[in-house]
Amino acid sequence: MPRIIRQMARLIRLCIAGEGGRMGVVYFFTIFGLDLIGIQLTLRLIAWTADFYNALQKLDVGEVIRQVGIFFLLTAITASLHLVSTFLRQILNIRWRRALTAAALDRWLHAKAYWRLWLQSKGEEIDNPDQRIADDCRIFVNRLTSEALELLSKIIAIFSYVALLWSLSTFPLAFSLFGADVEIPRYMVWVAPIYVLIASGMTHWLGSPLQKLNVEQQHREADFRFALARMREFVEPIALADGEKAERRIFDRRFQRIVENWRAIIKRDFILGCFTRPYMQTVLRIPTFLALPAFLAGKVTLGGLMQIGSAFQNVVTTLSWFIFSYRDLIELAAATARLDRFLSATEQAAAEPSSIALASDERGVILRNLTLATPDGRDLLRIPELHIEQGRATWIAGPSGAGKTTLMRALAGLWPHGSGAASAPRLSAMFLPQQPYAPLDTLAAAAAYPLAPEAVGEHAVRQALQDVGLGLYADRLDDPDTLKRLSGGERQRLALARVLIHRPAWVFLDESTSALDSRAEADLMNLIQERLPDITLVVIAHRQPVGVRGLVTLDIEPLRADAPGQKAPGKQDAGAARAA
């Protein structure tokens, strides 16, 4: 429990610290003030109960009609307060959700924490970050504003209701027990908390397993949604491979996991409901039954009986907040734990130091005693020394598994695993992977990425698309569906169009032309070197790139699996270069 409270306090601070968060505090206490007014109206309704039923007992028609009018007036005021409170609560929710979502996004994107988390071997700790940001932020804020406000108002209300019940319960409960006379003064006051305490303990005992089950259900639901979204992303290769049955097996397997956990939740809900449902149905009648001895003994009138019953009912229902809100509290606790774990993981990933000393140097690439390792600590590639001069096109060659892509990631500052020192251009460099990324936006935004299209200009985008052979799409810059129609080769052309738009001094290409034929590759490489005569190309590829002038080749070899850290016999280090 203390841990959940600390986690919740941390998330609340993020809600308040964000944009509009402080104003949310004003809304919070305004709603709390309206709830306090609602408590006073409830006390007035309890008093009205006595007046109304006493008038009925006396058959006073005029007073009955008057009390009916008072009832509708109190109801109108109560309804108005409820509507205003609900409206303000919704504004509060969106303000704090926006602040918390912004904080989660900031931490996820800061220092490429999203990338570092992806590299971690224990990814189950931060599974489905999209769900953490989208769903858990919403659940946390919604449950927090409802349950926290209700808890505060219940704390104030219980003192008011108990004080009223104390003033009304002037009669004792007298009975004989084993031959001894027992008298309990103001027994209606003492019965309420004992009754609720026993019920609350039973509720927690029966329902505590629901928290872990709900966390697991969220995890499995997210896995199922991810599988569906992934098929949408790879519709073409699945269709070409007639992979519908294979995908269906995946969907069925993941959905079956949802069903299995859901059955466990249903079973636990049924067990909990066997206690809570009868409790909820009897809690409104128990007060009247308990006060009947006093009424039958003539110590209270009918109005007094109904007033005492109403006061007791409010005491019990207020104390029963934990029972009535148990499922919501479980959901709040689960969302709090997931969000806190996610934020802690992102902060830890962003602060994790790299074991490779990488410096920024726009003049060239220099590697000294560089060893690249896998995330689990196995050495992957060792480079005693390597120097790539500015202005010299370089082809980094090597077999699959040699660590070529990992080397590019290290030069981009994305690979923290290994040792040694490296300096590489960062500010004036562009790194192009084999599968270029296209954002969920228009073709113009994809061409200008990561800049906004407005910062580049429509003319520059159109010209770049024409130059790389995508002129067919130059009139569809604002069509959001254009990117879906691009083939793998066209996406690689689009990535090269970004090079022409951004005009970097260095470009690192990791199999970035693998989907193009040799003629197209040669034309595009010639185009880039003609338009950007000062550019330095570093090409990582299995086969020798064509159309690149002044190419220098660097061979790298993987470390032998049976002798980590050793070079394969008869091979040169990556530091040895030969002119192509």
Image: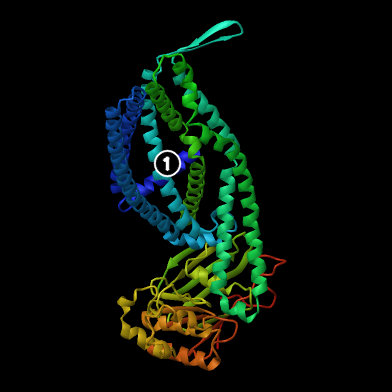
Q: Is residue 430 above or below residue 42?
A: below
Residue under the image location 48 percent in, 50 percent down: 339
- Which residue is label 1 attached to? 147
Residue 135 spot, x, y in % from top left: 47, 55
Residue 554 visible: yes
Q: Under tag 1, what secondary structure?
A: helix
- Tag 1: residue type? Glu
Instruction: Tell me the quadrant of the picture where the C terminus can be found.
Output: bottom right
In this rendered view, identify the residue nearer to me: 120 or 399: 120
- The residue closer to the viewer here, 22 or 355, is 22
Residue 565 visible? The answer is: no
Q: Residue furthest right?
A: 562
The residue depicted at 55 percent of the width and 38 percent of the height is 277
Q: Up-down: is 277 above or below 294?
A: below
Check the image and report above or below for 350 versus 276: below
* Image position, residue 246 (x, y; %): 67, 71
Looking at the picture, does residue 167 appear above or below residue 353?
above
Q: Position of residue 379 (x, y in %)?
A: 63, 64
Residue 278 pos. (x, y %): 56, 35
Q: Report the number of discs.
A: 1
Q: Quadrant of residue 527?
A: bottom left
| Residue nearest the observer in this picture, 400 or 434 | 434
